[in-house]
Amino acid sequence: MNTVTSKISDLIHESEARPASKISSLVHDPEVRSAALFWTMSVLGTALLALIVCLLGITPAWSNTPDVPSVTVRYADLDLSTSAGANALHQRIQAAAKQVCGPQGADLIEQTGWRRCYRMAVGDAVRKVNSPLLIAVHTGKPPAMTAMVVK
């Protein structure tokens, strides 16, 4: 196989300096063609395997039953244009996140996983509500100013 490697290397490198007859003989060499075919099939096989793995990883997103636990937080009774309403909803979201993520755990790894779950659950819920005042309560920053155009 070492001679095939050197032939392929000769074909790839310095091909401009080689006469056409030398390049032609390398291209038509059965060992070189066999090695090129093996390499091509290896690359295609790897790409196919990667595609299958990716598709299997995406499949749960297509199913009707989510694998992720969830809690519905109702807020129709709250006025999200007030600080009190946004704070009340933020507290409800935090309580629901604690319920979804379960107990914190005893060791550092479990606690780290719980904190990540909690942060993601609260952050996702706040983004879904899409209220500037709720986002401000969540981030601790003042609400973003937006320009309104009136006809």
Image (tube, rainbow, N blue to C red):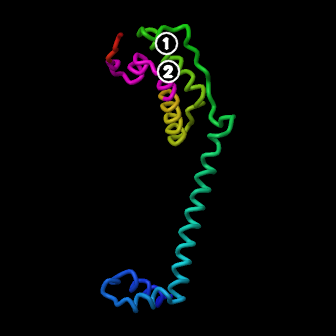
Residue found at x 60% / y 46%: 58
Circle 2 Cα neighbour tier, 10 Å, few/some/many (<14 / 14–19 / ≥20): few
Q: Which mark is residue 129?
A: 2
Instruction: Tell me: 3 left or right of 149.
Output: right
**Whole-percent x, y for residue 16 in the image:** 32, 83
Query: Which badge, 2 or 1, comes first in the chain's sequence?
Result: 1
Residue found at x 61% / y 51%: 55
**Whole-percent x, y for residue 97 in the image:** 55, 26
Instruction: Tell me: 133 left or right of 68.
Output: left
Return the residue at label 1. Answer: 88
Q: Give the overall secondary structure of the magenta segment.
A: helix
Q: Is residue 75 above or below residue 70?
A: above
Amino acid tagged 1: Ala
SS for dot 2 = helix
Query: Magenta region: which residues?
Result: 124-146
Cα distance between the residues tagged 2 and 1: 13 Å
**Whole-percent x, y for residue 100 in the image:** 60, 28
Asked if residue 136 is among those painted magenta in the image, a careful observer would answer: yes
Residue found at x 57% / y 22%: 96
Instruction: Tell me: 69 left or right of 79.
Output: right
